[in-house]
Image (cartoon, rainbow, N blue to C red):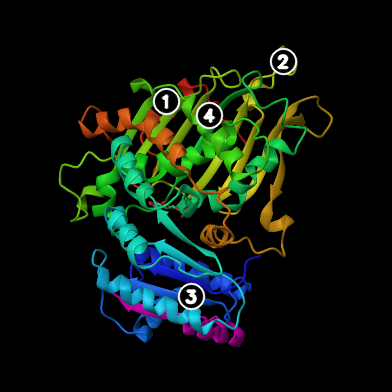
């Protein structure tokens, strides 16, 4: 591993994302020993004029619960917070960034006892509208200047644009300043344990290899549900809607991992080449394979316009034009304010031909990968009902991570991904052409929605979403199985 000074700069340090995700992830990495104090310094940067201690106290409650924490944890929190310094400045003027650069350089010179390079990581926990100016400032004022080598990397969060054109513009603006290996586009679903398991599952198990195709699989569902609404984020959400917020990125990444061909190696470029190929094989979305919904009460949020038609729920069917998947619907479904919080991939197999047991009504073989909560994989299959009669019943082979890996703490997605950025591993980050291909799939539909050509059907908060979505699911071939 590389050594030398490591400066992590969190831009937008007083914002929600930084407090809720970035700093806690850094704290966990620190506790696990990945951010050695003799090398690491963390800088918070934002416009608000506050002191180091004020930033530290704002972050603190997201790191630890004083009532439950052990003395060691409290001690770790105190030490971690001491690594953090705050610099205030604007996002579009050089003064603040020059000051930031001086602070980083000072830290680097103090760490000169450690032989090695200087590493500078800039995490943009900011709205994308300021990415171009912030990237320009970093490039002008804050690049690594060490003779001993090292690097400068930038981490950006979605939304990367609102459609193909705006995403391409953003990519071009950032691309003028940084090379692709310096840019880390985070999709935090790629940091989830069971998402990372997908390639292992598919390509390290003989079981699945011959079955994973149109001859055996009837349909695939990739589902995201939340049991709460937009909660204070209505203003942001209303400009984007559920397709841009969840489906075009998080669910599409899951889709890629289910549908892509085997990469020739685990090199990030090889994996991402295969993702791009499958994305480019997706056919245009058909209007009658889309259902949109909006939960009742969404417009009560004062930041949401009274007549908003923005979907908080969507079911969209993707069809892949290739040898493996022709005819197999991939049903991507996401919704806010539904009856549960869950994210899962459901692979449903075809009926057994010439069924002598008449077990069809009990349901099909289905393989379920539950990303959250309680990570699990289970397989629904038919067995003989134990007892004297020759009848059949649906049962499960169940691998629940909590039970099977009791002593392992599953890392948070952000923790893993930030570590990857420090290590320089882009496997779990979105490449520019991949981003483009994903916008190509959804842009025509998004434009139609923006033009009001689709209506968002109202649904009750706490429900399954509009009934029309279940009808679409059935039409696409999904058969509800019972028992689990
Ligand atoms: C974010 C979305 O990307 O993902 C949010 O902007 C959503 O709307 C969140 O709530 C869900 O993430 P997770 O990890 O809780 O499933």
Q: Which mark lies nearer to you, 4 or 2? A: 4
To which residue does mark 4 refer?
A: 278
Label 3, label 4: how far apart the Cα atoms are: 39 Å
**Closer to the N terminus: mark 3 or mark 2?**
3
Label 3 within 8 A of ligand 1 by Cβ:
no
**Closer to the N terminus: mark 1 or mark 3?**
3
Label 3, label 2: how far apart the Cα atoms are: 56 Å
Position of residue 392 measured from the top left corner of the image (x, y, whole percent): 74, 27
* Camera-nearest residue between 274 and 1: 1
Q: Which mark lies nearer to you, 4 or 1? A: 4
Q: Which mark lies nearer to you, 3 or 2? A: 3
Q: Dot 2: within a 10 Å radius of its alpha carbon, few (fewer than 14), some, or many (20 or more) residues? A: few
In the image, which residues are magenta?
Answer: 64-88
Q: Residue at x 15, y 46 (%)?
A: 306
- Furthest residue to the right? 388
Q: Residue at x 36, y 70 (%)?
A: 13
Above-or-below relation of 90 to 154: below
Label 1, label 2: how far apart the Cα atoms are: 26 Å
């Amino acid at each position: 591993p590389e050594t030398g000074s490591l400066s992590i700069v969190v831009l937008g340090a007083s914002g929600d994302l930084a407090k809720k995700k970035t700093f806690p992830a850094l704290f966990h990495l620190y506790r696990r020993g990945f951010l050695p104090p003799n090398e690491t310094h963390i800088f918070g940067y934002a416009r608000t004029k506050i002191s180091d201690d004020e930033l530290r106290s704002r972050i603190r409650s997201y790191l630890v619960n004083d009532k439950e924490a052990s003395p060691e944890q409290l001690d770790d929190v105190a030490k971690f917070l001491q690594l953090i310094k705050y610099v205030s400045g604007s996002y579009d003027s050089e003064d603040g960034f020059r000051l930031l650069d001086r602070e980083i350089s000072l830290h680097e010179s103090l760490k000169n006892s450690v032989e090695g390079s200087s590493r500078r990581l800039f995490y943009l926990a900011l709205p994308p509208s300021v990415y171009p100016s912030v990237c320009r400032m970093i490039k002008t004022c804050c690049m690594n200047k060490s003779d001993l080598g090292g690097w400068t990397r930038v981490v950006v969060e979605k939304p990367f644009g609102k459609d193909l054109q705006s995403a391409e513009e953003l990519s071009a603006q950032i691309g003028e300043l940084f090379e692709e290996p310096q840019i880390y586009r985070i999709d935090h679903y790629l940091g989830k344990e069971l998402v990372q398991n997908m390639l292992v599952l598919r390509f390290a198990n003989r079981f699945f290899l011959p079955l994973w195709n149109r001859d055996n699989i009837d349909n695939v569902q990739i589902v995201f549900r939340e049991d709460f609404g937009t909660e204070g984020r209505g203003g942001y959400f209303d400009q984007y809607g559920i397709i841009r917020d969840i489906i075009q990125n998080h669910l599409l990444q899951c889709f890629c991992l289910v549908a892509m061909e085997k990469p020739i190696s685990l090199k990030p470029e090889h994996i991402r080449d295969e993702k791009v190929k499958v994305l480019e094989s997706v056919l245009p979305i058909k209007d009658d394979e889309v259902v949109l919904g909006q939960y009742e009460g969404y417009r009560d949020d004062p930041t949401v316009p009274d007549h908003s038609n923005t979907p908080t729920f969507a079911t969209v069917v993707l069809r892949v034009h290739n040898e493996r998947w022709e005819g197999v619907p991939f049903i991507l479904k996401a919704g806010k304010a539904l009856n549960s919080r869950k994210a899962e991939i459901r692979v449903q197999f075809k009926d057994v031909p010439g069924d002598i047991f008449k077990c069809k009504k009990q349901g099909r073989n289905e393989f379920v990968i539950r990303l959250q909560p309680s990570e699990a994989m289970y397989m629904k299959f038919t067995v003989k009902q134990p007892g004297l009669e020759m009848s059949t019943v649906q049962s499960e082979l169940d691998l629940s991570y909590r039970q099977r890996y009791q002593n392992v703490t599953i890392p948070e997605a952000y923790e893993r991904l930030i570590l990857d950025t420090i290590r320089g591993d882009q496997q779990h980050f979105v490449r520019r052409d991949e981003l483009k291909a994903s916008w190509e799939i959804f842009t025509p539909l998004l434009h139609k929605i923006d033009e009001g050509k689709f209506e968002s059907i109202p649904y009750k908060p706490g429900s399954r979403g509009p009934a029309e979505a279940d009808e679409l699911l059935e039409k696409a071939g999904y058969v509800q199985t019972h028992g689990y």
